[in-house]
Every structure is written in C-alpha cells, then in structure tokens.
Image (spheres, coloured by chain):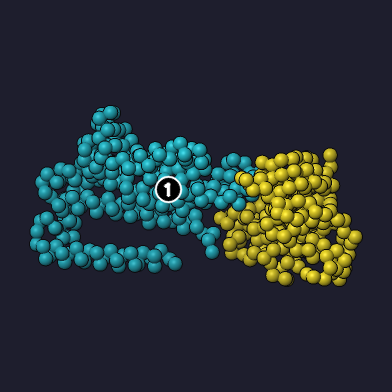
Chain colours: A yellow, B cyan
Amino acid sequence: MSKLEVDISAKMFGAQKVLGEIRFEIPAGQRVALLGVSGVGKSTLLSLISGTETAFEGRILRPSWRIAMVFQTPRLLPWRTLAQNIALVPDAGGLARARELLSAVGLADAADQFPEKVSLGMQRRAALARALAVDPDLILMDEPLVSLDAASAAEMRRLLTETLDRTGAAALIATHDRREALALADRVLMLDGPPGRLAEDRQSPLDRAERGDPNAVSSLHMDWFGADV
Amino acid sequence: MGWQARLLWPLISLAGLVAIWMVAALIAQSDLLPGPLAVWAAVEREVAEDYFVHLGATLLRVSAAFVLAMGIGSAIGIALGMSETADRVFGGWLVFFLNLPALVTIILCYVWFGLIEAAAIAAVAINKIPNVAATLREGSRALSRDLAEMALVYRLSWTDRMRQVVLPQLAPFFAVAARNGLALVWKIVLVVELLGRPNGVGFEIHSLFQLFDVAGILAYAIGFILVVQAIEIGVIGPWERAANRWRR
C-alpha cells in the first residue's frame, strides 16, 4: 500500500458533529490542499490522520509512512534552543543533523537561539526543519502561512515548495486561503460545513513550475472561484 | 544584573530591620526584648557550647523531611493533575490532609511509632506532602495540550516526554513548592523537636524557654533563618534563574 486512505463517516465532540462524510486517498509524493473556512474541521481532520485524535467513525489506513506535522502554532519547546528542539525527535541524528536541517531552512545562525527570542516566521521555519528530521513520507501542515506578513509568507511558500521538491514527500496542507492552496497543491480538497464534509476534489491543471507564477495562480483562481475574492 | 547588585537592596532592607529592632530594644530596656548585640553575645555563648550540634541535627531532619515531601508530594500532585479519575477519587484525601493540623500529625506519629527519629521525620513530611501535591497538581493541570500533541506526533519516548516536555513546564511550580516547603518544614521540625527529640534547635529553644532566655531563643532562630536564606540565595535562586533563562 503506497497511499493514505481516509474514510470518515463522522467525528463527534460530545454531542456535536464536527466532521461528516470525508473520503479521499493521497498517493506517495502528491501535494494536496485541504481548503475550507475556519471552523470547518480541517485541523480536526489533520489530528485524526496524525493519530493524536483517535475517536471517530470510519477508518484511516496509513501505509508504513513516516508522518510529520507542522502545526498552526510552531509548538517548539521554549526552554530548548531551535537545534535542541529538532535533535529531540527520535532518530533525528543529533545536534549535527539538526544544524544541517536548520541551515536548509535558512536558520544556520539561529540554531542556538531560544524560540521566544526569534520571530514567528523563524519559528515556523524551525518547525518545518523539525518535520524534516523524521525523513517524512507525508507532512501534514496546518495553515503554514497564517499570521505571517506578506514577505515572510512568500519566503515560507518558496521554502515549502523547495523542501517538498527536494524530499519528494507527500503533503496535506490545511488552509483557508484559496490562492495559497492553488500555489502549493497538485490537488485541492474543498470542505464545506460545519460539520465538515468533502464538497469537491479537484486536480490542479497547473504543473509545479507554473504554480510559482502568480499570474497563472490568479488565472486559475478566477477560473475556479471567480473574481469575488 | 551582577550578584552584588542583586544583594544590595535586600541587604539595605535587612539593615533597616536590624535598626528598627535596635531602637525598639533601646526603648523597651528589657531582657524580654534583647537588642542585636545581646543576641550576638548569646550566639557566641551558644557557639562555645553545642550550637552547631543542634543546628546540624535540625538541618538533617529538615533535609530528610524536605526530600521525602518533595518526592512523594510531587509524584502525587503530578498523578492527580494528569488523571481526572485519580483526582476525582483521591482529591478529597488531599483536602483532608491539607486541613489536618500539624500538631495532630506529630502527636499521632509519636503515639503510633514512638519517640524515634523516623516518626519525627515522617510527621514533618506528612505535614508538607499535601502542600507540595496541591501545588504540583495545579501545575500539571496547566500543562500544554499543544506540546503533549507535538510529543505524540513526533513519538517522543516516555522519558523524553517527562524530561523535556512535562518537567520544564512544572519548574516554576517546583520552585514555589520548594520555597514554601523549606519555610514550612523547618518550622514544623522545631515543633517535632520540642515535643519529642533530645536535640535540635526546637529542643534547645524549649530548654531556653524554661529559663526565659529570649536572647538565646533569638540566637537559634536567627542562625536558622540565615541558613535557610543561604539555601535560597545559593541554591533555589540560581536554579530558578537557570530554569528560566529561555524566557524573553
């Protein structure tokens, strides 16, 4: 089995249904955006796939993939330096490899800084480096560009694309931002709700090189969603 | 800030307290309120006898009871904070022991186990354990769920979860429990010694009380306060600063 298979019929929080029918597969190496408004259940779905939430109706078949997650907030240990946060991951290869990974995300000079002493953008990049420490087959990303200023978001988008190109990992990227989804993903899963359910599953007509062109992304945005946003 | 600068204001403040004490003693002109010089003379007199023997005996009891109380209390507090079921079942016990008067525990320990060292130390530890447990329970309840999820996703071992994720979050609560614990434990140790030990500061204060030797009583009290202050300045303070160096 070389694909992730998600088949959820319901996820409840107490009496409240937060997810309804959601079925999809992600083959190895594919980048998939999970697009939906805030509160529709994107983060909950990522939690189910990552295994941090286990109570739901349905099944999720994970191949023997290594799964990493980039959370919406970086979730670095504030009392450990950026390098120590990465070295903490089992089989990460210790501090030497942690420094290499930080260097790959442009943080070579900040390796010995504590998270609270660097910007949010730098913390996000460190969190991405931590995800890479497990040599992931699938990276789950929860709103990876949210709360970043335009320049930091563009830099992070470039870094994500480069990283996924280099590692060949599959990605499931939860976002509420349509342009972000179109710029990053081979395929877009659109959720509506709540409770969140899969409304559409669209393959992007843009290849990976074309997605780096803002005009191509705008054109596709117009085509799929119209000019209202 | 250097250590000299950190010590400056506390020293000025303490000097002020000594000055007020000196003036009060001069006004009172009574053996019941001896001034700093009379107390210093009492210190010199007691040091020539067995001041450090008694101080040492008390310190040993304080250390043993403190270590026991911090160890057992922390384990109970963390368990109650991390398990709602444990807290529902045993939370009432904590309230019971928190409200059990120290004197009752001490007397019961002496009655049940005899006037022995183990009973004395157990009595002090039992008095302090609920306070430590209550403090650490609050700390454990405040543990970050986000970091717990991160540890789960990245498959951190149980040891790493405790050492790298849980215990650092509890560090401020350990510091509060340790600081309050030290202050409380040594006060209870004095009562334990007064009631049933043949040595220690409590025993000696009891003897001096029979003689209405207030200068001698203050000599022992001040000696012990200085020791506890040295532990605060030399051990707890530096540890707390090291544990918090990551903060902005």
Quadrant of residue B102 in the image? top left
x and y percent of residue B2 in the render? 43, 66
Q: Give the total number of marks visible in the rendering.
A: 1
Q: Is residue A18 above or below residue A106?
A: above
Circle 1 Cα neighbour tier, 10 Å, few/some/many (<14 / 14–19 / ≥20)? many
Quadrant for the C terminus of chain B in the image:
bottom right
* Chain for disc number 1: B
Quadrant for the N terminus of chain B in the image:
bottom left
x and y percent of residue B60 in the render? 32, 41
- Residue A164 is left or right of residue B71, and the answer is right
Q: Say if residue B117 shows up in the picture.
A: no
Query: Which residue is pictured at 11% across the width and 49% down the height?
Result: B212
Q: Nearer the viewer, residue B201 or B161?
A: B161
- Residue A4 is left or right of residue B77, and the answer is right
Query: Which residue is pictured at 69% across the width and 45% down the height?
Result: A11
In the rendered structure, which amino acid carries the disc numbered 1? Thr
x and y percent of residue A184 in the render? 81, 60
Q: Nearer the viewer, residue B63 or B85?
A: B85
Query: Which residue is pictured at 86% across the width and 71% down the height?
Result: A215
Quadrant of residue B192 in the image? top left
Q: Is residue A225 above or below residue A137?
A: below
Quadrant of residue A75 in the image? bottom right
- Residue A146 is left or right of residue B65, and the answer is right
* Tag 1 residue: B135
Q: Nearer the viewer, residue B51 or B125?
A: B125
Q: Secondary structure at mark 1?
A: helix
x and y percent of residue B209 in the render? 14, 46
Query: Which residue is pictured at 35% across the width and 43% down the height?
Result: B98
